[in-house]
Image (spheres, helix red, strand yellow):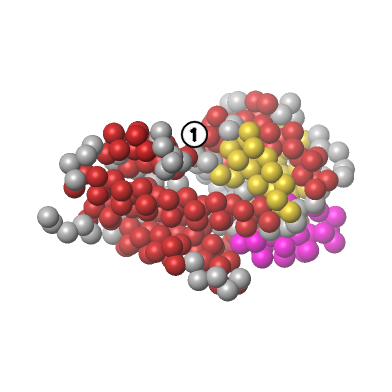
Amino acid sequence: MKPIDTLGFIGLGVMGEPMCANLLAKSGRTVCGTDIKRAPVERLAARGLKACASIAEVAAGADAIFLSLPSGREVEEVCLGAGGIAQSGGRVHTMVDMSTSPPKLMRELAEKLAPRGLTFLDAPVARTRQAAHDGTLSIMVGGPAEACEALRPYFSCMGTEVNHCGGHGAGQVVKILNNMVLFMTGQALAEALAIARRAGVDGKLLFEVMAKGSSDSFALRNHGLKAMVPGVFPADAFPVDYAIKDITLALDLAAQGGVTAPGARTACELLQAASRAGFTAEYWPVVVKMVEKNSTSS
C-alpha cells in the first residue's frame, strides 16, 4: 500500500460536508475537496479545506479520495467518466465510495480501476446526520483488508465503528441490509404510534416506555422520538426518495438470492406511497403520516 499523505473529498452534501469537516479537524492531513455546489466548498475552505474547482484537481492533489454522492450512477461517472478520477491521473492511488451504491457496481469498479494502479474500496456509512457532524458514524468497509487498515485512521475521524465486512461490495451489502431493517422498524414504529394515539395513549410516553423494554432500538430513540412523535421531518435530512433507493437495492439483493422478503417489500410500498403523496424530500420517518392517513375512523 502506497503512503497516504494527502486526502481528497468529492461530494460535500448533507453527510459529506460534516464528514469532510471531521477529516479536516482530526486527520492532520491536507484535504482537497470539491462539489457541484460552491457553498459547502466555501464553508469548508474557511476551516482549512484546499478548495478545488474540478475532480481532476482533487485527483492531482490527493493520495486517497473519499466519495459521498447521491447514487451509484454519480459514483461511476466520477470514477470513470470524462474528467473523472481515472482519466485525470495525478497522485491519487486509492478511492473510497462512502455513498450507498449497488454491490455489483463496487466489484466492477474495483476490476476496472485496478489495471490503472488504483485501489478501490466501498465504505458506506450508517446513523444520522447528527452522527456525521459528531464523527460517530458506523462505517462498513468492503475491499482489501490491507487497504482498510491503511485508511482506518481516517475512517476513525468520521466514525466510532469501523468494520471490515469482506471483499468488494461487502460493505454495501451490510449497509443496504442495515437500512432495510431500519425502514422496516420505522414502519412498525409508525403503526405503533398511530395505534397508541387512537387508543388514547400519548405517543411520547409510549416510545419512552418502549425504550426501556425489549422493543428498544436506535430507530425508536432517534427516528421515533425525535421525528415521528414531534412531527419534525426536515428536508435537509435523509429524504424519502433516498430511502426508496436503498430499500430497492435491498430488494434487488433479495431477488438475486431467491429470498422473497415480504416485510421489506411492504416497507418499500409505504415509502413509495409517501413519495407519491408529495413527501419526496422530507425526512423518511414522515411515513408515519401515511399510516395515520390510511387509518379508518373509529
Question: Which residue is located at x 68 percent, y 58 percent?
Answer: 169
Query: What residue would you read off at disc 1?
Result: 130
Residue 13: % across, % down? 52, 43
Region of the chain picked out in magenta, as a range: 102-123
Q: Residue at x 68, y 33 (%)?
A: 156
Q: Residue at x 62, y 48 (%)?
A: 124
Nearer to me, 298 or 158: 298
Crowd class of label 1 (few under 14; some 14 to 19; many from 20; radius 10 Å): some
Q: Magenta segment, principal secondary structure? A: helix
Measured as percent of width and height from the top left, residue 48 is found at 65, 27
Q: Quadrant of the C terminus?
A: bottom left
Q: Please tell me how many numbered marks the rendered image carries.
A: 1
Mark 1, secondary structure of its residue? helix
In the figure, is residue 12 to the left or right of 297? right
Q: Quadrant of the N terminus?
A: top right
- Residue 90 visible, this orientation: no
Q: Residue at x 24, y 45 (%)?
A: 196
Report if residue 138 lies within the magenta region.
no
Vertical arrangement, residue 164 with respect to residue 241, above or below: above
